[in-house]
């Protein structure tokens, strides 16, 4: 299709032709075209089929306001052709039709709409009940628009992130937005300007009318844009869609990269001090019969097609407009060669006389206080009926284009999400912001201004206010006074639908989900007459483009249908994202962030299997043998080492350090001595264990203690929170990341360690539960803790993280002749299970406290002063009946090992479950720790265990036994 | 015109035999069953905004009965079976989409937890299975079972009887049903106080007037603790914001509800074709329903690892509601104590949709007979002061950095 001659308003580059295809048909467009305008210029009129009735849909707007132009591009579904720039080679396809998009066989649904009244989903498909599953299949198939291509490859590198800093953010690069950016930047503030289109200029960009009788608006817009771009304090983000403005001015957005950009899209976040919302207006859709026919379009859409893209939107047109911009579009298009058969203007008065004059001069019939009542044509528009809004008069015109608009609707989404309150304003027919959160300033057309000078000045006012709210001593007073002298908001078009509505053909409030005027009426009749209820029951504004088209019209229509005033009726809350955004974009590079221990690298062997444990990556198995048998046996028979750097490690000191210990630990911590370790637990107020570890004293009022891996992060907060009223003086230092830790365990561990140090590490020098600070290899300062978690002679060595790899290597060398080997979490799990040591979260749960776990001996019952956390709960529950208890058990068949979580059953009643269950290679017997109801906790009790993995039901028999299973006297620990 | 209304428009009376505070599914269900089963029809449901404004219209509509403890499973199982009955009875298609739920497991600990839930369900007569990772992939072909993700999948827990129900429809259907029996539904009516005299509830005060009633049920969802406070009862409830979002509608790609504890994410495809997804609650107690960008980012990161084909899908709507969390993640279903005639149906957190109708049924019985039904025994308010948590989660739940 030929394009109009060059005009300076155009944004296409005729020198750069781009080839693409639509439904396999080769087509050509120009650089600068959107996919939609390129398609349109090639004569495509039907872009899609609607979701419910499968009606043909075409180009209606140009900024992605509806689902009409959702297409599949190169395998990506639901891409809006209006907001996507054309690129060479694009394969564009239609979605959701049967047969062809021009002749969709499912279009038959359009005839059956009386089966689909408001809420029909809830009345159909389920009688008799057996048809429902079948209906589900059909509904699912019919629903949905886009189809995912599961094989499409998405590269993470195509998606980036940008976290910006600025004092002022301006949303919208129209005249008001540009002006506010400039005034704020001139105050020395850093400004970020967001604009969804690939260029600045807003609604100036295509207009040839003059600004105050001087230059044409488009020229003024481009000059302003140059000024903005050149300003060193302003960063302009083009083709950037703001997706949210939320609490305390946090803005999210995404930018679509141009061909040179190193990204396809990038996610943007910024929290400026102040925000100017200059998002302008969209055209308010006029609701009338068949207002969705391809060939019906908004006035700016028609005008921009010609002015921006050089495409005449039709040959013979009828206009139904609601404001001066509509008249201006008709005149300009006429002058560019469009035949204008008639113009209906819904307004009774308030027209710009100059425009009326221009219409008359051109001999175009003008119908005042008229509007479109229907579009004709089965698939595309071939005629229009205009009707009087005050009488029953009407008139039909043949045409291939029906330009229809009910004036403007402000784009209030960002104000809505940031919590502004709106009031209905009968003068403009707008919902205007009347209560604003701090440091948020609306500006421009969205406030009802129509005069360019007013719009720009309003931008200045808001820009200055924004600067002022950043702490500058700027005053907006002068600009405000200037604004007062300029034309204020104009009376808005006071209709949203044409005459003769409610009978005849469908009139759409919402294109995306085929929400019609009739459905809105049915909602009201059924009592679902609030926008929130009608929206859900009738389905308005819940589709792919969300509230855009119906948002402001729905409450206005409901108000009319209810016959009530607009009081209490508002557009429903806007939800982010304002513009649908790809998950790939939001996910961005999705860095895999985890903590590595200082010894991580040395353990990265091909056969090692890592697991995420909290923030860390840790080795669970060092081989593919998931029983970890060899690792276990090495520790039992000789020596093994495990990286336990993730354990929480803390120093606590100061005059009141002991008091703090007494508060959070359940034991009497005054018994903590130098050179000795004390094992204890921290409880919550319910008496449940939240942490366990060892504590030692390393100086006067100076303690060192460990916590479990998962708890390390919360420990400081826990101490502070539970001593918050005390005014105690103590300091708590988290050394977890500063110190590496290795547990050297097994009967040969002393021998191994002795090769690296000359210091006395004999049983006398560091007995079981002893603590000593050593120099290893002459200089590494090591804290040696003789703990017995795995049930053998062992030394937990804590030392500066920077020595992590060195010491690990040295221990390996020293242990070589004993066959030293690393062991992982799985081996440790079994080793400590053999020893009957609990893991918090594995062997404990909400229903059990310290006493239920058999650890009551840790509780210092005599404590009065300490007010130990959890002690009252222990006192209360002691002797309480019906609690779960932790027991040890052995299976009757030694080699049978039920899995963790297997259930202990009495008939079909669950009476307990296995917490940790493993085959013990040391004892050659399956053992487990289980929580059981009290009656079953006696030694010797027989239990039935049920497990069903992968549909292989198993029953096991087991007996409650005493723990520990291994080395009950603890001899091996003490040697 | 009146005859077409789903529920009748009525005048606020001066006195009712029972009043439900909150027009969510719990209040509507309790009213419906009170009228249907116990002949108490002079009942009002008082709603501050509109029917379904709270969690009932904001949840992700997942229903299932594979909880951790048998006490819970029994209640939820009965609840799951009730949908079919209710659809018939109320003559309203609530669109129970029985797609089954797959819970992916990413650690040895999660496998153990799932084994417990599976065995508990099976012993309670509820279908639930433990799957290996290949079986997970067979069920959901789009699933990534490679080892190259943050939390590789080790297995799954599959629960065939679960699925999703159209949440708004439940509220409307119950409103319709209750209204047929004469129950009054008052929207835009806010309860501002609860009247108690000599240890007995006597009625409520609303912004539209004072009502007398010998029975009052607090079923105000996230706001339950505020209402209990009006009667001087302090509940161990933390209100936490919980967010959810949907993508643009797609042709079928996900045929089950999928959830993952390690990734903190769940998703399902609604009958309309949207992928609805949610995750954890915001950890700071508050009464706002703001959405946060970090949350959307989390969802995108998690979903695109688990189901990489979703990279090419777009989020289109993100919202939030309030979850009223108790310390053990089980509800408080309680009455006549310490105030006669005052009943509590609160603490439903993020799991009170699936249980709405069934709980309404038993709370109605509770209110009619002034005796706690057996099945509600585990959910007494007194359990907290007796340190008897229900065991619905393994770990003690934390609501803040101090926990
Ligand atoms: C994002 C999200 C996802 C969820 N996902 C699921 C899920 O998948 N499955 C599931 O089972 N559950 C889910 N839930 C939880 C579930 O939605 C709730 O537990 C459930 O809706 C509670 O219902 P309700 O009737 O008790 O309360 P609500 O539905 O919250 O209703 C309470 C009503 O009380 C009204 N009210 C409050 N104060 C007053 C007052 N002073 N006077 C009068 N009225 C008042 C409110 O306006 C509200 O309408 C989710 C919740 C959220 C927020």
Image (spheres, helix red, strand yellow):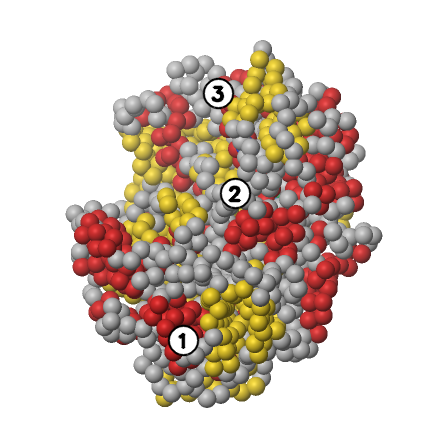
The residue under the point 62% across, 75% down is: A377
Residue B354 versus residue A183 in the image, above or below? above
State which mark lies toward you, 1 or 3.
Answer: 1
Question: Any mark on residue A871, and which?
Answer: 3
The picture places residue A963, in percent across and down from the top left corner, at 61, 31
Q: Which residue is more in the foreground, A117 or B195?
A: A117
Label 2 crowding class (10 Å Cα cut-off): few <14, some 14-19, many 20+?
Answer: many
Callout 1 touching callout 3 (CB < 8 Å) = no
Check disc 1 and report the residue beneath it.
A360
Mark 1–mark 3 distance (CA, rounded to whole Å): 91 Å
Q: Position of residue B105 (x, y in %)?
A: 60, 51
* Residue B321: numbered disc: 2
Q: Nearer the viewer, mark 1 or mark 2?
A: 1
Q: Which residue is drawn at 45% across and 61% down?
A: A347
Camera-near label (3 vs 2) is 2
Q: From the viewer's perspective, is residue B282 above or below residue A687?
A: below
Residue A663 in sight in this render? yes
Assess mark 2: CB under 8 A from ligand 1? yes
**Within the image, what quadrant is residue A459 found in?**
bottom left
Question: Label 3 is found on which chain of the structure?
Answer: A
């Amino acid at each position: 299709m030929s394009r109009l001659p060059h005009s300076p308003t155009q944004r296409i580059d005729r020198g750069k032709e781009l080839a693409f295809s639509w439904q396999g048909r080769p087509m050509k467009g120009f650089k600068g075209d959107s996919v939609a305008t390129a398609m349109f210029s090639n004569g495509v009129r039907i872009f899609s089929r609607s979701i419910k009735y499968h009606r043909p849909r075409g180009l209606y707007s140009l900024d992605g306001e509806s689902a009409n132009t959702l297409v599949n591009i190169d395998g990506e579904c639901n891409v809006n052709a209006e907001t996507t720039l054309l690129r060479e080679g694009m394969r564009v396809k239609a979605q959701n039709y049967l047969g062809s998009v021009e002749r969709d066989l499912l279009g038959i649904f359009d005839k059956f709409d009386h089966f689909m009244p408001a809420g029909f989903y809830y009345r159909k498909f389920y009688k008799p009940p057996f048809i429902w599953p079948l209906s589900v299949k059909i509904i699912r198939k019919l629903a949905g628009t886009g189809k995912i291509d599961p094989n499409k490859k998405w590269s993470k590198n195509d998606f980036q992130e940008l976290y910006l800093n600025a004092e002022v953010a301006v949303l919208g690069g129209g005249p008001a937005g540009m002006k506010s950016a400039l005034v704020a930047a001139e105050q020395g503030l850093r400004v970020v300007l967001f604009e969804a289109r690939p260029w600045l200029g807003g609604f100036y960009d295509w207009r040839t009318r003059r600004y105050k009788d001087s230059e044409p608006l488009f020229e003024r817009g481009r000059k302003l844009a140059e000024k903005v771009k050149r300003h060193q304090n302003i960063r302009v983000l083009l083709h950037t869609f703001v997706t949210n403005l939320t609490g305390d001015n946090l803005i999210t957005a995404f930018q679509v990269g141009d061909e040179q950009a190193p990204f396809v899209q990038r996610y943007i976040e910024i929290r400026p001090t102040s925000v100017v919302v200059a998002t302008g207006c969209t055209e308010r859709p006029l609701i009338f019969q068949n207002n969705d026919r391809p060939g019906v379009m908004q006035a700016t859409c028609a005008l921009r097609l010609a002015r921006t893209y050089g495409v005449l939107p039709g040959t013979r047109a009828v206009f139904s407009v609601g404001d001066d911009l509509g008249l201006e579009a008709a005149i300009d298009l006429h002058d560019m060669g469009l035949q204008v058969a008639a113009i209906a203007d819904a307004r009774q008065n308030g027209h710009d006389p100059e425009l009326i004059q221009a219409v008359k001069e051109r001999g175009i019939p003008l119908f005042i206080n008229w509007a479109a009542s229907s579009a004709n044509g089965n698939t595309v528009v071939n005629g229009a009926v205009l009707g009087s809004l005050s009488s029953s008069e009407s008139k039909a015109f043949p045409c291939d284009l029906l330009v229809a608009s009910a004036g403007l609707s402000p784009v209030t989404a960002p104000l809505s999400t940031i919590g502004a309150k709106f009031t209905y304003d009968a003068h403009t027919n707008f919902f205007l912001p009347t209560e604003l959160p701090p440091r948020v300033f609306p500006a421009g057309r969205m406030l009802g201004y129509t005069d360019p000078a007013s719009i720009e000045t309003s931008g200045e006012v808001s820009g200055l206010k924004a600067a002022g709210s950043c702490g500058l001593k700027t005053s907006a007073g002068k600009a405000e006074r200037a604004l007062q002298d300029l034309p204020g908001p104009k009376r808005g078009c006071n209709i949203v639908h044409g005459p003769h509505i409610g009978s005849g053909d469908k009139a759409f409030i919402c294109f995306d989900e085929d929400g019609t005027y009739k459905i809105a009426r049915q909602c009201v009749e059924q009592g679902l007459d609030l926008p929130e209820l009608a929206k859900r029951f009738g389905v308005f504004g819940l589709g792919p483009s969300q509230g855009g088209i119906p948002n402001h019209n729905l409450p206005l229509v409901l108000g009319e249908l209810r016959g009530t005033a607009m009081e209490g009726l508002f557009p429903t809350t806007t939800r982010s994202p304002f513009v649908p955004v790809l998950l790939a974009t939001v996910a961005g590079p999705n860095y895999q962030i985890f903590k590595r221990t200082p010894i991580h690298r040395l353990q990265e062997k091909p056969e090692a299997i890592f697991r995420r444990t909290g923030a860390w990556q840790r080795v669970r198995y060092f081989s593919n043998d998931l029983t970890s048998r060899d690792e276990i046996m090495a520790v039992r028979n000789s020596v093994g080492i495990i990286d336990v750097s993730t354990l929480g490690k803390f120093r606590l000191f100061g005059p009141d350090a002991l008091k703090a210990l007494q508060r959070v630990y359940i034991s009497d911590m005054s018994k903590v001595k130098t050179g000795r370790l004390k094992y204890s637990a921290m409880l919550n107020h319910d008496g449940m264990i939240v942490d366990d570890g060892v504590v030692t004293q390393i100086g006067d009022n100076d303690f060192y203690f460990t916590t479990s891996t998962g708890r390390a992060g919360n420990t400081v907060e826990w101490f502070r929170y539970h001593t918050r009223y005390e005014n105690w003086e103590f300091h708590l230092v988290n050394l977890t990341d500063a110190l590496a830790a290795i547990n050297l365990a097994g009967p040969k561990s002393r021998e191994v360690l002795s090769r690296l140090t000359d210091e006395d590490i004999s049983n006398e020098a560091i007995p079981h539960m002893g603590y000593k600070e050593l120099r290893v290899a002459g200089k590494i300062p090591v804290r040696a803790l003789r703990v017995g978690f795995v049930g053998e002679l062992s030394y937990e060595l804590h030392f500066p993280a920077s020595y992590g790899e060195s010491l690990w290597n040295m221990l390996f060398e020293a242990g070589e002749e004993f066959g030293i080997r690393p062991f992982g979490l799985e081996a440790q799990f079994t080793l400590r299970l053999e020893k009957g040591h609990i893991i918090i979260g594995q062997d404990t749960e909400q229903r059990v406290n310290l006493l239920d776990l058999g650890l009551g001996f840790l509780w210092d019952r005599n404590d009065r002063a300490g007010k130990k956390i959890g002690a009252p709960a222990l006192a209360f529950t002691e002797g309480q009946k019906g609690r779960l208890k932790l027991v040890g058990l052995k299976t009757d068949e030694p080699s049978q090992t039920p899995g963790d979580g297997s259930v202990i059953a009495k008939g079909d009643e669950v009476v307990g479950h296995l917490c940790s269950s493993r085959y013990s290679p040391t004892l050659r017997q399956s053992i487990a720790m289980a929580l059981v109801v009290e009656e079953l906790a006696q030694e010797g009790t027989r239990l039935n265990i049920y497990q069903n993995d992968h549909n292989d039901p198993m029953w096991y028999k087991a007996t409650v036994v005493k723990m520990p299973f291994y080395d009950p006297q603890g001899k091996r620990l003490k040697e | 015109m009146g005859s077409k209304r789903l529920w009748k428009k009525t005048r606020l009376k001066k006195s009712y035999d029972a009043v439900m505070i909150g027009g969510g599914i719990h209040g509507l269900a309790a009213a419906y069953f009170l009228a249907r089963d116990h002949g108490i029809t002079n009942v009002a449901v008082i709603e501050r905004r509109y029917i379904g404004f709270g969690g009932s219209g904001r949840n992700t509509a997942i229903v299932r009965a594979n909880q951790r403890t048998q006490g819970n499973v029994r209640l939820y199982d009965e609840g799951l079976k009730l949908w079919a009955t209710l659809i018939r009875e109320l003559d309203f298609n609530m669109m129970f989409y029985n797609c089954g739920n797959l819970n992916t497991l990413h650690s040895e600990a999660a496998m153990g937890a799932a084994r417990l839930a599976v065995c508990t369900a099976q012993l309670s007569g509820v279908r639930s299975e433990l799957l290996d990772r290949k079986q997970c992939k067979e069920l959901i072909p789009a699933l990534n079972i490679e080892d190259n993700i943050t939390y590789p999948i080790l297995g799954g827990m599959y629960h065939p009887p679960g699925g999703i129900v159209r949440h708004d429809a439940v509220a409307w259907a119950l409103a319709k049903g209750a209204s047929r029996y004469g129950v009054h539904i008052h929207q835009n009516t806010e309860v501002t106080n609860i009247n108690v005299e000599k240890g007995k509830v006597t009625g409520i005060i609303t912004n539209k007037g004072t009502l007398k009633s010998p029975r009052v049920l607090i079923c105000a969802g996230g706001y339950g603790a505020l209402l209990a406070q009006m009667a001087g009862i302090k509940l161990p409830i933390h209100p936490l914001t919980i967010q959810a979002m949907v993508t643009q509608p797609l042709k079928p790609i996900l045929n089950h509800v999928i959830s993952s504890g390690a990734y903190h994410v769940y998703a399902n495809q609604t009958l309309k074709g949207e992928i609805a997804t949610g995750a954890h609650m915001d950890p700071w107690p508050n009464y706002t329903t703001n959405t946060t960008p970090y949350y959307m980012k989390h969802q995108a990161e998690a979903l695109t690892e688990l189901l990489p084909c979703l990279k090419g899908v777009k989020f289109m709507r993100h919202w939030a509601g309030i979850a009223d969390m108790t310390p053990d993640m089980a509800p408080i279903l309680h009455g006549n104590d310490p105030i006669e005639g005052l009943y509590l149906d609160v603490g439903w957190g993020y799991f009170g949709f699936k249980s709405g109708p069934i709980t309404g049924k038993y709370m109605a019985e509770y209110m009619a007979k002034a005796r706690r039904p057996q099945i509600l025994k585990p959910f007494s308010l007194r359990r907290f002061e007796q340190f008897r948590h229900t065991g619905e989660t393994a770990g003690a739940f934390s609501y803040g950095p101090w926990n």
